Amino acid sequence: MTAIAIPPFTFHQGTQPLLVSIPHCGTHVPPALAARLSDAALQVPDTDWHLERLYAFARELGASILVATHSRYVIDLNRPPDGSSLYPGQNVTGLCPVDTFAETPLYRRGDVPGEAEIAARRAAIWQPYHAQLRAELDRLRAQHGVAVLWDAHSIHSVLPRFFAGQLPDFNLGTADGASCAPALAQALLPIAEAAPGYTAVLNGRFKGGHITRHYGEPARNIHAVQLELTWRCYMDEAPPYAYLPERAAQVQPHLRRMLGAALGFARGAAA
Protein backbone atom coordinates (compact mmCIF):
# COMPACT_ATOMS: atom_id res chain seq x y z
CA MET A 1 0.00 0.00 0.00
CA THR A 2 2.34 2.71 -1.24
CA ALA A 3 -0.27 5.16 -2.55
CA ILE A 4 -3.86 6.01 -1.76
CA ALA A 5 -6.60 7.20 -4.07
CA ILE A 6 -7.97 9.88 -1.76
CA PRO A 7 -6.28 12.06 0.88
CA PRO A 8 -6.19 10.58 4.40
CA PHE A 9 -8.14 13.51 5.87
CA THR A 10 -10.03 16.70 5.22
CA PHE A 11 -9.17 19.80 7.21
CA HIS A 12 -10.83 23.11 7.98
CA GLN A 13 -8.70 25.74 9.72
CA GLY A 14 -10.61 27.82 12.22
CA THR A 15 -9.94 31.02 14.12
CA GLN A 16 -10.32 29.90 17.75
CA PRO A 17 -8.05 27.78 20.00
CA LEU A 18 -10.14 24.64 19.51
CA LEU A 19 -9.47 21.63 17.27
CA VAL A 20 -12.15 18.99 16.73
CA SER A 21 -10.59 15.69 15.63
CA ILE A 22 -12.87 13.00 14.15
CA PRO A 23 -10.60 9.99 13.50
CA HIS A 24 -13.16 7.20 13.07
CA CYS A 25 -15.83 8.59 10.74
CA GLY A 26 -14.06 7.57 7.53
CA THR A 27 -15.63 4.84 5.39
CA HIS A 28 -13.20 4.56 2.46
CA VAL A 29 -11.53 1.19 1.89
CA PRO A 30 -9.04 1.02 -1.04
CA PRO A 31 -10.25 -1.41 -3.72
CA ALA A 32 -7.31 -3.83 -3.35
CA LEU A 33 -8.05 -4.17 0.36
CA ALA A 34 -11.81 -4.32 -0.14
CA ALA A 35 -11.31 -7.40 -2.33
CA ARG A 36 -9.88 -9.22 0.70
CA LEU A 37 -12.58 -8.26 3.20
CA SER A 38 -15.70 -10.17 4.20
CA ASP A 39 -19.14 -8.97 3.21
CA ALA A 40 -19.76 -7.92 6.80
CA ALA A 41 -16.54 -5.92 6.92
CA LEU A 42 -17.39 -4.09 3.70
CA GLN A 43 -20.37 -2.56 5.50
CA VAL A 44 -17.85 -0.88 7.87
CA PRO A 45 -20.32 -1.24 10.78
CA ASP A 46 -17.91 0.08 13.41
CA THR A 47 -17.70 3.54 11.87
CA ASP A 48 -18.32 6.60 14.05
CA TRP A 49 -21.16 7.45 11.71
CA HIS A 50 -22.15 10.98 10.67
CA LEU A 51 -20.03 12.83 13.22
CA GLU A 52 -18.86 15.37 10.66
CA ARG A 53 -22.54 16.25 10.17
CA LEU A 54 -23.37 16.21 13.86
CA TYR A 55 -20.46 18.55 14.63
CA ALA A 56 -20.96 20.83 11.61
CA PHE A 57 -21.89 23.63 14.01
CA ALA A 58 -18.30 23.68 15.29
CA ARG A 59 -17.33 25.80 12.28
CA GLU A 60 -19.68 28.51 13.54
CA LEU A 61 -17.76 28.48 16.83
CA GLY A 62 -14.48 29.06 14.97
CA ALA A 63 -13.08 25.59 15.59
CA SER A 64 -10.60 23.84 13.34
CA ILE A 65 -11.92 20.46 12.19
CA LEU A 66 -9.85 17.42 11.19
CA VAL A 67 -11.83 14.54 9.68
CA ALA A 68 -10.53 11.09 8.66
CA THR A 69 -11.52 9.69 5.27
CA HIS A 70 -10.44 6.03 5.57
CA SER A 71 -12.18 3.34 7.57
CA ARG A 72 -10.69 2.29 10.88
CA TYR A 73 -10.48 -1.17 9.28
CA VAL A 74 -7.67 0.17 7.09
CA ILE A 75 -5.84 1.65 10.06
CA ASP A 76 -7.04 2.94 13.40
CA LEU A 77 -5.91 6.53 13.89
CA ASN A 78 -6.66 6.39 17.62
CA ARG A 79 -4.20 3.60 18.36
CA PRO A 80 -0.48 3.96 19.17
CA PRO A 81 1.76 3.53 16.10
CA ASP A 82 3.42 0.47 17.66
CA GLY A 83 0.05 -1.23 18.14
CA SER A 84 0.35 -1.45 21.93
CA SER A 85 -2.89 -1.89 23.88
CA LEU A 86 -4.66 1.15 25.31
CA TYR A 87 -6.40 -1.01 27.92
CA PRO A 88 -4.03 -3.85 28.89
CA GLY A 89 -5.89 -6.97 29.91
CA GLN A 90 -9.14 -5.91 28.24
CA ASN A 91 -10.60 -6.96 24.91
CA VAL A 92 -9.56 -4.32 22.36
CA THR A 93 -9.01 -3.87 18.63
CA GLY A 94 -5.59 -3.07 17.21
CA LEU A 95 -3.82 -0.63 14.92
CA CYS A 96 -4.88 -2.62 11.86
CA PRO A 97 -7.91 -4.57 13.10
CA VAL A 98 -8.51 -8.17 12.10
CA ASP A 99 -12.10 -8.46 13.36
CA THR A 100 -15.20 -6.34 13.84
CA PHE A 101 -16.54 -5.21 17.21
CA ALA A 102 -18.87 -8.22 16.93
CA GLU A 103 -15.72 -10.38 16.67
CA THR A 104 -16.36 -11.54 13.11
CA PRO A 105 -13.22 -11.81 10.95
CA LEU A 106 -12.50 -8.91 8.60
CA TYR A 107 -10.48 -10.96 6.13
CA ARG A 108 -12.43 -13.56 4.20
CA ARG A 109 -9.39 -15.81 3.58
CA GLY A 110 -7.52 -15.02 6.76
CA ASP A 111 -4.83 -13.06 4.92
CA VAL A 112 -4.38 -10.49 7.66
CA PRO A 113 -1.81 -7.72 7.13
CA GLY A 114 1.80 -8.43 7.99
CA GLU A 115 4.34 -5.98 9.36
CA ALA A 116 5.31 -4.56 5.95
CA GLU A 117 1.68 -3.87 5.02
CA ILE A 118 0.96 -2.32 8.41
CA ALA A 119 4.02 -0.08 8.02
CA ALA A 120 2.84 1.02 4.57
CA ARG A 121 -0.64 1.88 5.88
CA ARG A 122 0.90 3.75 8.79
CA ALA A 123 3.06 5.83 6.44
CA ALA A 124 0.24 6.54 3.98
CA ILE A 125 -2.62 7.34 6.38
CA TRP A 126 -1.74 7.34 10.09
CA GLN A 127 1.31 9.57 9.88
CA PRO A 128 -0.24 12.31 7.69
CA TYR A 129 -3.29 12.56 9.97
CA HIS A 130 -1.13 12.85 13.05
CA ALA A 131 1.25 15.28 11.40
CA GLN A 132 -1.70 17.57 10.63
CA LEU A 133 -3.06 17.17 14.15
CA ARG A 134 0.31 18.04 15.67
CA ALA A 135 0.87 20.99 13.37
CA GLU A 136 -2.55 22.49 14.08
CA LEU A 137 -2.25 22.13 17.85
CA ASP A 138 1.16 23.78 17.71
CA ARG A 139 -0.24 26.58 15.52
CA LEU A 140 -3.14 27.19 17.88
CA ARG A 141 -0.89 27.25 20.91
CA ALA A 142 1.56 29.61 19.21
CA GLN A 143 -1.23 31.96 18.13
CA HIS A 144 -3.47 31.86 21.21
CA GLY A 145 -1.18 30.67 23.99
CA VAL A 146 -3.43 27.65 24.50
CA ALA A 147 -5.00 24.85 22.48
CA VAL A 148 -7.94 22.56 23.28
CA LEU A 149 -8.32 19.27 21.41
CA TRP A 150 -11.79 17.71 21.29
CA ASP A 151 -11.52 14.12 20.06
CA ALA A 152 -14.99 13.18 18.83
CA HIS A 153 -16.18 9.56 18.78
CA SER A 154 -19.44 7.63 18.80
CA ILE A 155 -20.41 4.03 19.47
CA HIS A 156 -23.28 1.57 19.69
CA SER A 157 -24.94 2.01 23.07
CA VAL A 158 -24.87 -1.75 23.72
CA LEU A 159 -21.67 -3.57 22.78
CA PRO A 160 -21.01 -6.66 24.92
CA ARG A 161 -17.45 -7.12 23.68
CA PHE A 162 -16.31 -3.96 25.44
CA PHE A 163 -18.77 -3.27 28.26
CA ALA A 164 -21.72 -4.77 30.10
CA GLY A 165 -25.19 -3.31 29.77
CA GLN A 166 -25.94 0.04 28.18
CA LEU A 167 -23.21 2.64 27.93
CA PRO A 168 -23.86 6.15 29.28
CA ASP A 169 -24.65 8.60 26.48
CA PHE A 170 -21.87 11.11 27.15
CA ASN A 171 -18.56 9.38 27.92
CA LEU A 172 -16.00 12.06 28.64
CA GLY A 173 -12.39 10.96 28.89
CA THR A 174 -9.35 12.85 30.15
CA ALA A 175 -6.99 9.93 30.75
CA ASP A 176 -7.93 10.03 34.43
CA GLY A 177 -7.12 13.72 34.54
CA ALA A 178 -3.73 13.55 32.81
CA SER A 179 -4.72 15.03 29.45
CA CYS A 180 -6.19 18.37 30.54
CA ALA A 181 -6.42 20.79 33.41
CA PRO A 182 -8.99 19.80 36.05
CA ALA A 183 -10.92 23.01 35.39
CA LEU A 184 -11.75 21.89 31.86
CA ALA A 185 -13.27 18.59 32.96
CA GLN A 186 -15.09 20.42 35.76
CA ALA A 187 -16.62 22.76 33.18
CA LEU A 188 -17.72 19.98 30.83
CA LEU A 189 -19.12 17.25 33.08
CA PRO A 190 -21.94 19.33 34.64
CA ILE A 191 -23.21 20.26 31.16
CA ALA A 192 -23.39 16.60 30.19
CA GLU A 193 -24.93 15.58 33.52
CA ALA A 194 -27.59 18.30 33.30
CA ALA A 195 -28.73 17.33 29.79
CA PRO A 196 -32.28 16.00 30.25
CA GLY A 197 -32.87 12.50 28.93
CA TYR A 198 -29.18 11.63 28.72
CA THR A 199 -26.64 10.00 31.03
CA ALA A 200 -23.01 10.97 31.49
CA VAL A 201 -19.75 9.79 33.02
CA LEU A 202 -16.18 11.06 33.27
CA ASN A 203 -13.33 8.57 32.81
CA GLY A 204 -15.60 5.55 32.85
CA ARG A 205 -15.15 2.72 30.34
CA PHE A 206 -13.60 5.12 27.81
CA LYS A 207 -10.89 7.30 29.32
CA GLY A 208 -9.48 8.55 26.00
CA GLY A 209 -7.52 6.79 23.30
CA HIS A 210 -4.07 7.41 21.89
CA ILE A 211 -4.95 10.86 20.57
CA THR A 212 -6.21 12.15 23.90
CA ARG A 213 -3.39 10.60 25.86
CA HIS A 214 -0.59 11.54 23.47
CA TYR A 215 -1.53 15.12 22.62
CA GLY A 216 -2.92 16.27 25.94
CA GLU A 217 -0.09 18.23 27.59
CA PRO A 218 -1.65 20.51 30.17
CA ALA A 219 1.79 21.61 31.37
CA ARG A 220 2.28 23.12 27.88
CA ASN A 221 -1.27 24.52 27.83
CA ILE A 222 -2.47 21.90 25.32
CA HIS A 223 -5.57 20.25 26.75
CA ALA A 224 -7.25 17.16 25.27
CA VAL A 225 -10.69 15.65 25.92
CA GLN A 226 -12.41 12.69 24.28
CA LEU A 227 -16.16 12.36 23.99
CA GLU A 228 -17.56 8.94 23.15
CA LEU A 229 -21.22 9.58 22.33
CA THR A 230 -23.75 6.76 22.00
CA TRP A 231 -25.36 6.35 18.60
CA ARG A 232 -28.84 6.43 20.11
CA CYS A 233 -28.38 10.17 20.66
CA TYR A 234 -28.50 11.04 16.97
CA MET A 235 -28.88 8.04 14.63
CA ASP A 236 -30.44 4.64 14.03
CA GLU A 237 -28.33 1.97 15.71
CA ALA A 238 -29.31 -0.69 13.14
CA PRO A 239 -28.19 -0.87 9.49
CA PRO A 240 -28.12 1.21 7.37
CA TYR A 241 -27.28 3.45 10.35
CA ALA A 242 -29.35 6.41 9.21
CA TYR A 243 -28.79 9.90 10.57
CA LEU A 244 -31.91 11.07 12.43
CA PRO A 245 -32.05 14.87 12.13
CA GLU A 246 -34.76 15.39 14.75
CA ARG A 247 -32.91 13.30 17.30
CA ALA A 248 -29.60 14.93 16.43
CA ALA A 249 -31.17 18.36 16.90
CA GLN A 250 -31.96 17.41 20.50
CA VAL A 251 -28.37 16.54 21.41
CA GLN A 252 -26.56 19.22 19.41
CA PRO A 253 -27.34 22.07 21.84
CA HIS A 254 -25.61 20.11 24.61
CA LEU A 255 -22.60 19.43 22.40
CA ARG A 256 -22.51 23.11 21.48
CA ARG A 257 -22.56 24.08 25.16
CA MET A 258 -19.67 21.73 25.87
CA LEU A 259 -17.58 23.09 23.01
CA GLY A 260 -18.49 26.59 24.12
CA ALA A 261 -17.32 25.74 27.63
CA ALA A 262 -14.07 24.39 26.18
CA LEU A 263 -13.56 27.68 24.39
CA GLY A 264 -14.40 29.59 27.55
CA PHE A 265 -11.80 27.56 29.40
CA ALA A 266 -9.25 28.24 26.65
CA ARG A 267 -9.80 31.99 26.82
CA GLY A 268 -9.31 31.91 30.56
CA ALA A 269 -6.21 29.74 30.31
CA ALA A 270 -4.68 32.10 27.75
CA ALA A 271 -5.26 35.20 29.88
Image (cartoon, rainbow, N blue to C red):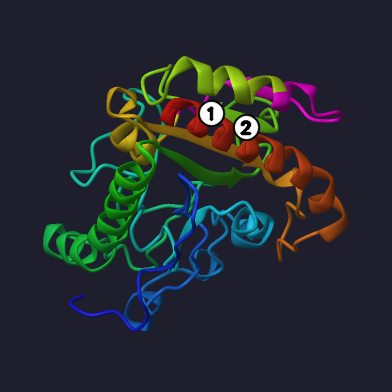
Q: Is residue 204 visible?
A: no
Give residue 83's quadrant in the image. top left
Quarter of the figure with the C terminus? top left
Q: Report if residue 267 lies within the magenta region.
A: no
Q: CA distance from mark 2 to mark 1?
A: 6 Å
Give percent across and percent down for residue 109: 33, 68
Are the residues flagged by discs 2 and 1 in contact, CB closer than 8 Å?
Answer: yes
Furthest-left residue in view?
A: 116
Q: Label 1 crowding class (10 Å Cα cut-off): few <14, some 14-19, many 20+?
A: many
Q: Where is mark 2, residue-wise? A: 261
Give percent across and percent down for residue 226: 50, 36
Q: Is residue 228 visible?
A: yes
Secondary structure under badge 2?
Answer: helix
Q: Label 2 crowding class (10 Å Cα cut-off): few <14, some 14-19, many 20+?
A: some
Q: Where is mark 1, residue-wise? A: 265
Give percent across and percent down for residue 152: 53, 45
Rendered residue at 75%/63% (across/down)? 242
Is 217 or 156 nearer to us in this picture? Answer: 217
Give percent across and percent down for residue 227: 56, 36
- Amino acid type at circle 1 is Phe
Looking at the rendering, the stretch of residues picked out in magenta corresponds to 191-207
